[in-house]
Image: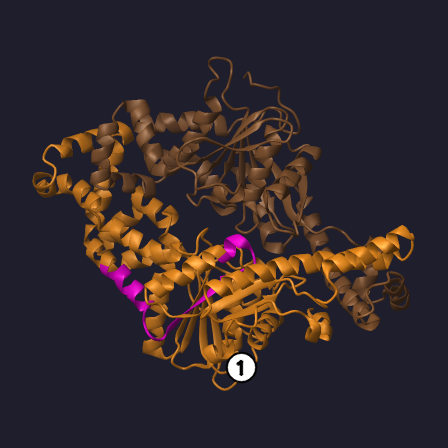
Chain colours: A orange, B brown
Amino acid sequence: MATATKRTSPTAMAALPDSCPILDTDALIDDRGVSVIVCCGSGGVGKTTTAAALALRAAERGRKVCVLTIDPARRLAQSMGLTELDNTPRQVVGIDAKGEGSLDAMMLDMKRTFDEIVISTSEPDRAQAILDNPFYQALSSSFAGTQEYMAMEKLGQLRQAAQESGRWDLIIVDTPPSRSALDFLDAPKRLGSFLDGRFMKFLSAPARGAGRFGARIFTTGINVVTGTMTKIIGAQVLTDLQTFIVSFDALFGGFRQRSEATYAQLQAPDTRFIVVAAPERDALREASYFVERLALEDMPLAGLVLNRVQPVILPELSTETAIAGADRLAEANEHHLTAGMLRLHADRAKNGRRQRRLAESFCAAHPTVPAASVAALAGDVHDLAGLREVAHELATE
Amino acid sequence: MPARKPGRGDWPAVRLHVVSGKGGTGKTTVAGALALALASGGRRVLLMEVEGRQGIAQLFDTAPLPYEERLVAVAPDGGDVFALAVDTEAALLEYLEMFYNIRRAGTILRKVGAIDFATTIAPGLRDVLLTGKAIEAVKRGERSGEPTYDAIVLDAPPTGRIARFLNVTSEVGGLAKVGPIKSQSDSVMGVIASKRTAVHLVTLLEEMPVQETLDGIEELHKNNLPCGGVFVNMMREPRLNPAEITQALDGTLDEADIRAGVQAASLPSRLSTDKVVDALMTEANEHAQRVALEQTERKRLSTTDQPIYELPEMNGGIDLGALYALARLLRQQGAA
């Protein structure tokens, strides 16, 4: 598909400035000391494709890989054998594995993952009561951040399964399509602190009968709060909520610990982050925030993958020169085809230079962050061959 | 309902334009351009964002927006675009004050974490507040016969969440069957599920965004939400005609003719004709592949009955000038 590009690639302008260190993706996936790679970035930048491509290449280079995807394109999912959302890793057939290399893939089912936690940590009756509660149902299917938390939870489970069974030695995770890349890091804390928060305890206190917290914290405030709550949301909702909290109470401590442990895993020495971006202002701004945040949290960054880069073929033919040439042909009213092609070149050169400037300013701001780029493909990636090509380009760029 | 100016374009009765789309499709840009287009001709439009990421401020190149309606742009032939970044917590406090006159209680609620609770989890409450704020802006001044805004443009959450975001009644209904929240959500639904609202979807001519758009349309219909237009964003300008595209795809472009063209274009002599021809042929082939894919996706989109608007890719990136150009195109196509 992109073979045509290869023909003239020696004269193509690099998407990244020379000063930018190169992200060696092969060294990364070959490193036996690395057992988890997290791909993150803002929505619509090709995280899933990057994760799947790296996973395939790693498997074909001999790693036993499991890739956790969140929301793959239908045809890409099908090509990996992911026809149903069953929350279980399935072997991907058709890979050209070296040695003991293998590739399993799975799609995250957020609600199911949450349900499984509830079931595995509660008595059957209590578990059912939780699963039936409207607040639980809302929390498990729509809380902003549940998906991020469950992705991390699932990563924790896979990592444990990998250690116990030896089935995988590398787990590659795609992160949920949130607006902001930082959501992935913040969501578990938010969910954890929320579930373990003062308000939850406060609400559950009257139902426990003693009013412990009320007495200690807000003797007068408590009536204002419950009064207001009743006024706004209605008594029935408050009752539902208190029932939910009480029945969920046993899980609270566990949740807090769980989310802290999951978060801590991301700082483990065998974990690496890849920040994925497209050469657009917003996506690179998010990537910048993420890079800074990872440094702050001591989470190891492998580098930046810049997707969908417009290659500038023959950079010495500038936008202006190409347009001038096309104008000359138009004036003479001849060679319409060549004039159109020159204008096409001008469009691409202009866009490519704009992207290059964006990449340059990212690299200037983060001079130590290694990066690799992938050219914009003419078509969508929806089979293993396409993934293989993306990974190859990532590795050889 | 008396508007300040009579409606025009394809959506004359619509006062609330909700703009959604897959991440990365340029939803905020389209919302901004639509607001400018709707404002042109001396109208007043409010552009709202609800995801707390200051996308509007970046788009219009202004300082971060406070929770306050501010003038951010003037349409070329008169007309104002105001912008508001809705902050959920502030909206909740405002709501408490407006309906219950209990701002003080709000402070206590915040102290115990109830505001956090209400705005992050209490299912649907956050959405009721955000959409409620938009409806409040729609209705403002209507009673006096002179609405404050001719139109509201809401830069809404992405397609995957849009039906749930807008369908506040059903979401809240499961929890609050009676009470003020219930009546508030009913009144919000009264506007959202009416002809005064249109939910527009932004897409690119790529597989996933198109799929998400088609799924989104189906979901909106299923939920009886008013589906608006499909905005195809970042379309490439056709530089070759259909016959040339076919030849470029097949690799049957007339190389000798192109060579003659390159020579006739009298490019600087430092450029080798061979290299230029080679580069142009490669680029034409890639372009043709992309165009073919876009045509396939365009065909899939045309299976919907929704009006389709097309916006070109801005090669220089999106700045204010580009935004005005997009707004002009939207008006020409009847979107505003």
Q: Residues in magenta?
A: A257-284
The answer for which chain carries disc 1 is: A
Closest to the observer: B93 or A96?
Answer: B93
- The residue positioned farthest toward the front in the image shown: B269
- Residue B185 spot, x, y in % from top left: 39, 29
The N terminus of chain B, quarter of image:
top right
Image-based side of A299 in relation to B38, left or right: left
Closest to the observer: A357 or B160?
Answer: A357
Above or below: residue A185 compared with residue B72? below
- Residue B269 spot, x, y in % from top left: 83, 69
- The residue positioned farthest toward the top in the image shown: B144
- Residue A340 spot, x, y in % from top left: 81, 56
Tell me which amino acid carries mark 1.
Ala
Above or below: residue B163 compared with residue A379? above
Above or below: residue A117 compared with residue B299? below
The C terminus of chain B, quarter of image:
top right
Residue at 57% x, 69% y: name it. A17
Image-based side of B286 in relation to A296, left or right: right
Query: Does residue B75 belong to the magenta stretch?
Result: no
Closest to the observer: B83 or B293?
Answer: B83
Residue at 82% x, 59% y: name it. B246
Residue where numbered disc 1 is placed: A97
- Callout 1 environment at 10 Å: few (<14), some (14 to 19), or many (20+)? some
- The residue positioned farthest toward the bottom in the image shown: A99
Q: Secondary structure at mark 1?
A: loop
Please state the total of marks drawn on the protein image: 1
Image-based side of B103 in relation to B221, left or right: left
Residue at 77% x, 62% y: name it. B284
- Residue B326 spot, x, y in % from top left: 65, 40
